[in-house]
Structures are given as structure tokens and as C-alpha cells.
Amino acid sequence: MEQWRHVFKLDPDRELADEALERVCLSGTDAIMVGGSSGVTFDNTVDLLARIRRYEVPCVLEVSEQEAIVPGFDLFLIPVVLNAKDPDWIVGRQHQALKEYGALMDWQQVVTEGYIILNGDSTAARVTKADARLDAKDVEAYARLADKLFRCPIVYMEYSGTYGDMELVRRVRSIVGQSRLFYGGGVDGPQKAREAAACAHTVVVGNAVYRDLERALATVQAVKETV
Ligand code: 1GP
């Protein structure tokens, strides 16, 4: 995780043909993250994991549904949505999950993501009731909260579905110390991938896989070439 520069995020609730999945898994990306904001179930998560496991690429689960926690992933990423107005998404669901599985968990495999949701129109924003009307100072403060106060291994600037403010991403990277800055949102081809890779530590590409696979695949090389 500390070395990842490029990640594809695949949604268990969306169709992806075997051939397309193969190309994604062999693309040279650093990891596949399985996750989505709606319609994620145990069954569709198990299915997708089994298909990805035919390849060697690391595969991690971003947990959003307790019922869809499937064993067998390399890591389990737990989002804590810092700007959620529904406290369920800050500590509520995590608390419930730990009541059930807390004693059984392998903590080596668990990674906390301090999430900042920045596209108010996204499903993630709706589900978590995130207040995405944040100015730069707000975002910086959330980043410090995740990095310095909570010491999350990942700070995730989530623009899901829309391309973000790269100046702000760059600023956040300059203030995080021990956290890795993940950027996700609207990276639909090599040019935006290069820009995002110049600003964040790790670039997450989601939608593009389903919209225009060729351009999505081209983001891998673009990110890797960017220093
Ligand atoms: C979504 O951050 C990821 O959770 C990637 O965003 O789907 O817009 O690429 P896109």
C-alpha cells in the first residue's frame, strides 16, 4: 500500500466482461480495490474477488457494507468519512462491525482511510450526507485530522464522478506527513492521470473502466511515468 501509485476501483454491482477484467488485472496497476457506494452484497463481492484471484495483482476490499465483508482479500480498507453528517459513517458502522468481528480480526490487514468527500452530487455524498461545500481551509483541517490526529495510513480525497481541484490536492499532499494521499474522481484518460499523479501519492481510477476501457488502461502508464 505504501508503494502504490495507481489503483483501479471495481464495483461489484457493475458488469465487467472477463476479457475486460483480464486486461485490467494485467495492466500493471498496483492493486485492484473492490468497492462501491450502493448495491454491494456478499454474493457480488465474492464473485468479483474469485474472478480477480485468477491473476496475481493485489486485491483489497473497501468495506461499505458489513454483510459484504468477504474473507480472502489482501487488505481491508475501512473508510471513516470525516465530513459525513451522518455519524454512522464516521464511527457507527465501524462500531457495529467491531461488536461482531472485533475479536476475530487480523489487524495487520486493516487499513483506515480518512475520507474527505468533495463531490456533493456523488452517491457516496448522498449516502453519508456529506457536507461537501468545503473551502480549502476546511479540507486542510480534515486532512490534518486524518493525518496528525487520527494517524490514518490513507487520506482519501474523493471526487467520485467528477475531476477535482488539483491545486487543492497538491496543497493537501504538502501538509500530510505519515499518511498517503489517495486521489479519486474523474480520471478518464492519460492526461488527467498525469496531472493527478503529480499532485497525489496514489491515483484511483473507477468509472473510466466501465466507460472507455482503452483510455482507462492508458492511465496506468501515465501515472507510472509521472514523478
Ligand atoms: C471512486 O475515487 C474513485 O470511489 C474513483 O472515481 O469513479 O470518478 O474514477 P471515478
Image (cartoon, grey):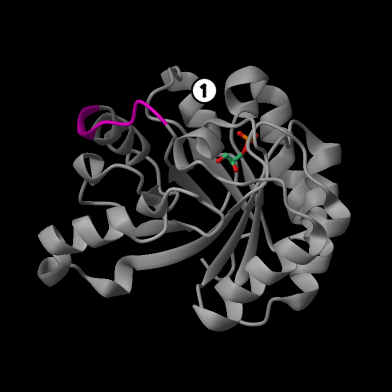
The quarter of the picture where the C terminus appears is bottom right
In the rendered image, the vertical position of residue 49 relative to residue 113, given as above or below: above
Some atom of ligand 1 lies within 8 Å of the CB belonging to the residue at label 1:
no
User: Residue 8 versus residue 80: which sits nearer the camera?
Assistant: 80
Is residue 227 in view from this perspective? no
Q: Estimate the x, y position of residue 66 in percent, counting from the top left.
A: 23, 46
Residue type (three-letter) at the residue carrying disc 1:
Ala
- Seen at 82% across and 40% down, the residue is 192
Let me know if residue 40 is in the magenta part: yes
Q: Estimate the x, y position of residue 171 in percent, counting from the top left.
A: 83, 67
Residue 64 occupies which quadrant of the picture? Answer: top left
Q: Estimate the x, y position of residue 85 in percent, counting from the top left.
A: 50, 50
Ligand 1 picture quarter: top right
In the rendered image, the vertical position of residue 159 relative to residue 81, given as above or below: above
User: Residue 55 versus residue 149: which sits nearer the camera?
Assistant: 149
Left or right: where does residue 225 sit relative to residue 57? right
- Seen at 31% across and 38% down, the residue is 49
What main secondary structure does the magenta stretch of the protein show? loop
Q: Estimate the x, y position of residue 81 in percent, counting from the top left.
A: 49, 55
In the rendered image, the vertical position of residue 17 relative to residue 158, given as above or below: above
Is residue 112 in view from this perspective? yes
User: Residue 74 versus residue 85: which sits nearer the camera?
Assistant: 85
Check disc 1: other Cα within 10 Å, few if <14, some if 14-19, many if 20+: some
Q: Which residues are magenta?
A: 38-43
- Seen at 44% across and 31% down, the residue is 11
Let me know if residue 52 is in the magenta part: no
In the rendered image, the vertical position of residue 141 relative to residue 71, given as above or below: below
User: Residue 154 versus residue 131: which sits nearer the camera?
Assistant: 131
* SS for dot 1: helix
Q: Which residue is mark 1?
A: 20
